[in-house]
Image: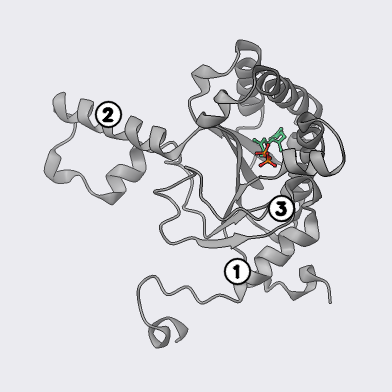
Amino acid sequence: MKFKDQIDVSRVPNHVAVIMDGNGRWAQTHGEMRIFGHLNGVSSVRETLSAAGEIGVKYLTLYAFSTENWDRPREEVAALMDLLVKTIVKEIDDLQENKVRLQAIGDLQLLPENCRKTLNQAIEKTKNNKRITLTLALSYSARWEITQAIRAIGEDVKNNKLQVEDINQVTIDSYLETHNIPDPELLIRTSGEKRISNFLLWQIAYSELYFTSVFWPDFKKEDFYEAIVAYQNRERRFGKISEQVSC
Ligand code: FPP
């Protein structure tokens, strides 16, 4: 039976986050340059977004470019930025037609001007769409995000907009890049690596982690559905015992 048919549609995660990994190694196995892997990774982005939308996932967050990725060879960084712009331009009508709201999190000021402009235009154009929110993590790292949040909290305390004793977990949530997105119930990482690599460290406190050896360019709808089925077979206890959560 196909994985899609095994999904309980009443228990689909609201938010799925994905660490898209393995583009470079996939390209290598095909005797090609790394960028060939990134180019082919775009079709997996499309498949994953479409698969998520089909089963009613409301938020999909993709780790597209980390703060640390700026240290890659200059040509690879330039090619990735170029690919991002071209992909947004190519896909914007489809995003709009499918009622996808595009967002981005990360230190977007570091993106090249044309990239930021194209991204902002697409974000503006799709801002009222309600079917699914696609968040691209770009020039993002969780430690950068948490540092920014702490600085902003400090500023607000200094300016008497916030009292220290009022700071709680909800306050911290509200200062993060993801303030308007619920925490992910499921985090998927492709390519066989079992690391979080500075992604959504605060938000994944209770997320189910799913690792697959499939390289990102080979990750298709059924791979996504397989991850959903695995998620649905887990028991989420949030620190309680089994009997407390099963009744
Ligand atoms: C990780 O593989 C992937 C990236 C750093 C870039 C992801 C980009 C895309 C899938 C294409 C563009 C995306 C959008 C949203 C338009 P890696 O290069 O780290 O692979 P490796 O671990 O095998 O070297």
Q: Earlier in the sequence, mark 1 or mark 3?
A: 3
Label 2: which residue?
151
Residue found at x 73% / y 63%: 225
Residue 128 in view in this figure: no
Residue found at x 73% / y 47%: 216
In the rendered image, residue 170, in percent from the top left (x then y), is placed at: 30, 49
Image quadrant where one finds the C terminus: bottom left
In the rendered image, residue 30, in percent from the top left (x then y), is placed at: 87, 41
Name the side, left or right, on which 242 lies relative to 121. left
Look at the numbered disc 1 and say if its residue's Cβ is closer than 8 Å to ligand 1.
Answer: no
Label 1: which residue?
231
Please determine whether, in this image, residue 159 is positioned above or below residue 187. above
Image quadrant where one finds the N terminus: bottom right
Look at the numbered disc 2 and say if its residue's Cβ is closer than 8 Å to ligand 1.
Answer: no
Please determine whether, in this image, residue 199 is positioned above or below residue 193. above
Q: Nearer the viewer, mark 1 or mark 3?
A: 1
Amino acid carrying label 3: it is Gly
Q: Nearer the viewer, mark 2 or mark 3?
A: 2
Residue farthest to the top, as pictured: 113
Name the side, left or right, on which 131 lies relative to 104. right
Query: Which element carries disc 1, helix, strand or loop?
Result: helix
**Front-most of 194 and 95?**
194
Q: Distance of mark 2 from mark 1, alpha carbons?
A: 35 Å
- Residue 230 in which image quadrant: bottom right
In the rendered image, residue 127, in percent from the top left (x then y), is placed at: 60, 32
Label 3: which residue?
53
Amino acid carrying label 2: it is Arg
Q: Earlier in the sequence, mark 2 or mark 1?
A: 2
Query: Which element carries disc 2, helix, strand or loop?
Result: helix
